[in-house]
Image: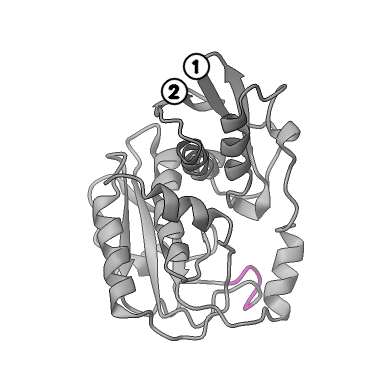
Amino acid sequence: MNLPVEAWYGAIFIRHSRRAYTGQFPEEEKIVRIEKVCREFRPFAEARAELVRSRPGQIFKGLIGQYGRVNDAPCYAAFIGDMSSPRVQEAAGYTGEGIILEAAALGLNTCWVGGFFRPEMVMHHIPLQENEKILSVTPIGYAIEKKGFSEKSLSVFARSHRRRTLGDLTDGSIPEPWMEKAIEAARLAPSAVNRQPWRFHIKENTVIVLTDNRRSSSPISKRLDCGIAMLHFELGARAAGVYGHWEFLDPPEVARFLF
């Protein structure tokens, strides 16, 4: 499947994580479209996405009791990785964000949930293959119009509206205008507790993505977050007319974008 650059790049700027939903099931044509993307967007062999048309029920759990819990979502998607692969986390992040951006482009709301869901319940809906693990899930539906107290409090806790500057994310100047556009797109990528662990090292004919050395309390892999940022970066690059491909690297580096 070719990247739908125009639709997904535009979705970067309208996507917001939401946890409270109306319960309304999305229109059939939108669900069919997401199912098609789940089926066909398989850029890496070790990661896949599956849409579940059932209400998630007790799959989502709150940070403390009901606090931070996803409520009234009509359906959800799961992001699954083959844990025998050393690059599974970044592959799952890249793949899953494709589904997130497709939903946003269709006018639907989502929220990456990696640490507060019950994978054993998801397995009742999705059979896993050998070595596979459910790494994250997302509700899909229409969010309520206004955030309630719980959602607002969680946004404050996660510092959801605080973004690092482009200078914070690079190790020097940004030599090309397209790189600035690509890194700006990556800057807007979602991450666990908004920690934004990706950094960009610019070299001749390549940009390397690596993780920062900050401590994090989240159990979610920083490399999964970086996989999300990788897709944003590539969409920004393609929107600027620059095409390239990814090569995966060893920690603390994640991947290089060769153009």
The quadrant in which residue 56 appears is bottom left
Q: Which residue is mark 1?
A: 205
SS at mark 1? loop
Whether residue 248 sits left or right of residue 51 in the image: it is: right
Q: Position of residue 198 (x, y in %)?
A: 61, 36
Q: Which residue is mark 2?
A: 259
Q: Position of residue 165 (x, y in %)?
A: 75, 40
Name the amino acid type tagged 1.
Asn
SS at mark 2? loop
Q: Is residue 104 above or below residue 90?
A: below
Q: Nearer the viewer, residue 19 or 126?
A: 19
Q: Is residue 197 above or below residue 35?
A: above
Whether residue 98 sits left or right of residue 67 in the image: it is: left
* Mark 2 surroundings within 10 Å by alpha-carbon count, few (fewer than 14), some (14 through 19), many (20 or more): few
Name the amino acid type tagged 2.
Phe
Magenta segment's dominant SS is loop
Whether residue 27 sits left or right of residue 11 in the image: it is: left
Q: Nearer the viewer, residue 240 or 82?
A: 240
Mark 1 vs mark 2, CA separation in Å: 6 Å
Q: Residue at x 30, y 48 (%)?
A: 132
Q: Position of residue 212 (x, y in %)?
A: 66, 32
Tell whether label 2 touches label 1 (CB within 8 Å). yes
**Magenta span:** 62-66
